[in-house]
């Protein structure tokens, strides 16, 4: 199983970025996938998740209305479109896949068994 995140970078507040996560080694279309982030000195926190079909999504309150998670099962890839970025969004962003197939959306770190290497997002004011 491999998850490869990309798309991070340095952006001014109010700007946008699109993260991608390419998956391989498992049946991507059967798993909930999501994004988490970890800022310096803080614990890893949930950002967004999307159901295996793409029909349902879940967001943490601080990103609702600004971030959009999506997936393309034909390409084994998930995305995180981040608009109206704020300095508080600065963190290392990780993509993750649920531990088991056909699961439900979940915010808990422990429910995700496979992780990408992280991509750094820095938002300057």
Image (cartoon, rainbow, N blue to C red):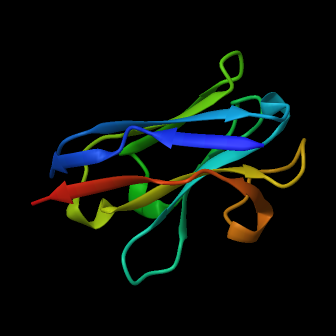
Q: Residue at x 18, y 46 (%)?
A: 11
Q: Residue at x 80, y 29 (%)?
A: 29
* Residue 73 coordinates in the image, percent (x, y): 71, 22
Location of the N terminus (image quadrant)? top right
* Residue 66 coordinates in the image, percent (x, y): 35, 45
Location of the C terminus (image quadrant)? bottom left
Above or below, 105 against 25 in this view is: below
In the image shown, does 80 or 121 lie closer to the viewer?
121
Quadrant housing residue 40: bottom left
Give the tally of numbered discs. Answer: 0
Above or below, 18 against 61 in this view is: above
Q: Residue at x 62, y 28 (%)?
A: 77
* Residue 105 coordinates in the image, percent (x, y): 74, 52
Residue at the extreme left of the image, as rendered: 125
Left-right relation of 111 to 115: right
Left-right relation of 94 to 96: left
Q: Residue at x 89, y 51 (%)?
A: 100
Residue at the extreme bottom of the image, as rendered: 41
In the image shown, does 77 or 59 lie closer to the viewer?
77
Quadrant housing residue 78: top right
């Amino acid at each position: 199983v491999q998850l490869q995140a990309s798309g991070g970078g340095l952006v001014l507040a109010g700007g946008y970025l699109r993260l991608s996560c390419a998956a391989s080694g498992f049946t991507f279309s059967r798993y909930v996938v999501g994004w988490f982030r970890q800022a310096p000195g803080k614990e890893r926190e949930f950002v967004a998740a999307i159901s295996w079909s793409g029909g349902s999504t879940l967001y943490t309150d601080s990103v609702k209305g600004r971030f959009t998670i999506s997936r393309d099962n034909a390409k084994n890839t998930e995305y995180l479109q981040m608009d109206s970025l704020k300095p508080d969004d600065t963190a290392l962003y990780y993509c993750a896949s649920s531990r088991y197939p056909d699961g439900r959306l979940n915010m808990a770190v422990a429910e995700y068994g496979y992780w990408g290497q992280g991509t750094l997002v820095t938002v300057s004011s």
